Image (cartoon, rainbow, N blue to C red):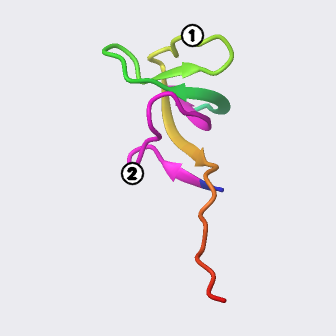
Amino acid sequence: MAWVQASDRLPGAGVEVQCRLRHFSGDIQEHRLVKVDEDDCAWRTAGDLAEISYSWDVIEWRDDSVAHASVEI
């Protein structure tokens, strides 16, 4: 598990992830969001799929994918 800067990489559409959001006032919060590929929004809340206010920017998301290392026997 690692935090990924949203400016570096985004999860695929339909993927639910834990995100850190920054409000224009500077406040930072964490929420479960779903990445979407829509004309007017990029993220929705995981619970009810509501649009996020434009006052908030996703700055990081947690990549929970597990990297599998190859093992030689």
**Magenta span covers which residues?**
3-25
Amino acid bearing label 1 = Ala
29 displayed left or right of 8: right
The image quarter containing residue 15 is top right
Q: Position of residue 42 (x, y in %)?
A: 41, 24
Inspect the magenta stretch and tell me whether residue 15 lies in it: yes
Q: Which residue of the protein is positioned furthest toward the front in this rendering?
A: 73
**Residue that mark 1 sits on:** 50
Dot placed on the residue nearer the N-terminal end, 1 or 2 = 2
Q: Is residue 65 above or below residue 10?
A: below
Q: Is residue 23 above or below residue 47?
A: below
Q: Nearer the viewer, residue 72 or 2?
A: 72
- Number of numbered discs visible in the structure rendering: 2
Amino acid bearing label 2 = Asp
Q: Which mark is residue 8?
A: 2
Mark 2 neighbour class, 10 Å CA radius: few under 14, some 14 to 19, many 20 or more = few
Question: The N terminus appears in which quarter of the rendering?
Answer: bottom right
Q: Position of residue 11 (x, y in %)?
A: 47, 40
What is the distance, in whole Å, between disc 1 and disc 2 at their CAs?
25 Å
60 displayed left or right of 36: right
Q: Residue at x 64, y 49 (%)?
A: 64
